[in-house]
Amino acid sequence: MKAQFKVGQKVTMTDDALDNYGEEYRGIVFVVKSKATKYMPSKEFYANGMPDGYHPGYDEGVKGMGLYDLVTSDDGDDFGNSLYDWELKEA
């Protein structure tokens, strides 16, 4: 599976993600704020101004998949967790 969502796209959580994060997120529409497909150590990531395409939490074992930071579509609040392709679906 390749990274399938784009920055600005609206998404919701899959049932598997809801099992991990909680039923209170069922039906909540999120907007993709950033997309990473490469790992960068945290210290380097923040020192370089959080460069696009990189994330300190990216698992290199899932090469090519996207790791996404999300905001809620209604108020723009950060979700606070990063989710992979298999945890999201198109809204």
Image (spheres, rainbow, N blue to C red):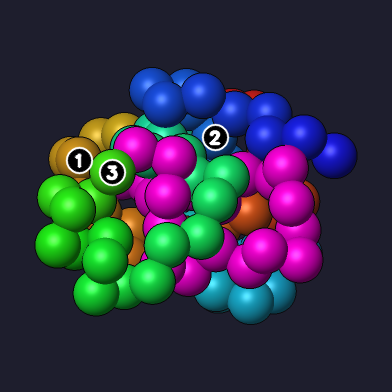
Q: Which mark is residue 1?
A: none
Which of the two residues, 57 or 18, is positioned nearer the viewer here?
Answer: 57
Q: In the rendered view, tell whether residue 91 sits above or below residue 56.
A: above
Query: Which quarter of the rendering shows the N terminus?
Result: top right
What is the number of the mark on residue 11?
2
Q: CA distance from mark 1 to mark 2?
A: 14 Å
In front: mark 1 or mark 3? Answer: 3
Q: Secondary structure at mark 1?
A: loop
Q: Residues within 10 Å of mark 3 (few under 14, many from 20)?
A: few
Q: Residue flagged by tag 3: what amino acid is it?
A: Pro
Q: Nearer the viewer, mark 3 or mark 2?
A: 3
Q: Is residue 23 left or right of residue 4?
A: left
In the rendered structure, which disc, 1 or 3, sits on the residue that comes first in sequence?
Answer: 3
- Amino acid found under the numbered disc labelled 1: Gly
Q: Residue furthest right?
A: 1
Residue 51: x and y in percent read 28, 43
Precedes in sequence: disc 1 or disc 2: 2
Taking the spot 67% from the left edge, 64% from the top edge, the residue there is: 60
Q: Which residues are magenta?
A: 52-72
Q: Badge 1 local density, few (<14 within 10 Å), some, or many (20+)?
A: few
Circle 3: element type: loop
Please give the label number shown on residue 76. Answer: 1
Sequence-wise, the earlier of marks 3 and 2 is 2
State the residue position of label 3. Answer: 51
User: In what element is the residue under mark 2?
Assistant: strand
Relative placement, left or right, of 74 versus 15 is left
Q: Position of residue 43 (x, y in %)?
A: 24, 74
Residue at the spot 14% in from the left edge and 62% down from the top edge: 47
Split into 4 quadrants, where in the image is the C terminus? top right
**Which amino acid, mark 2?**
Val
Q: CA distance from mark 1 to mark 3?
A: 21 Å
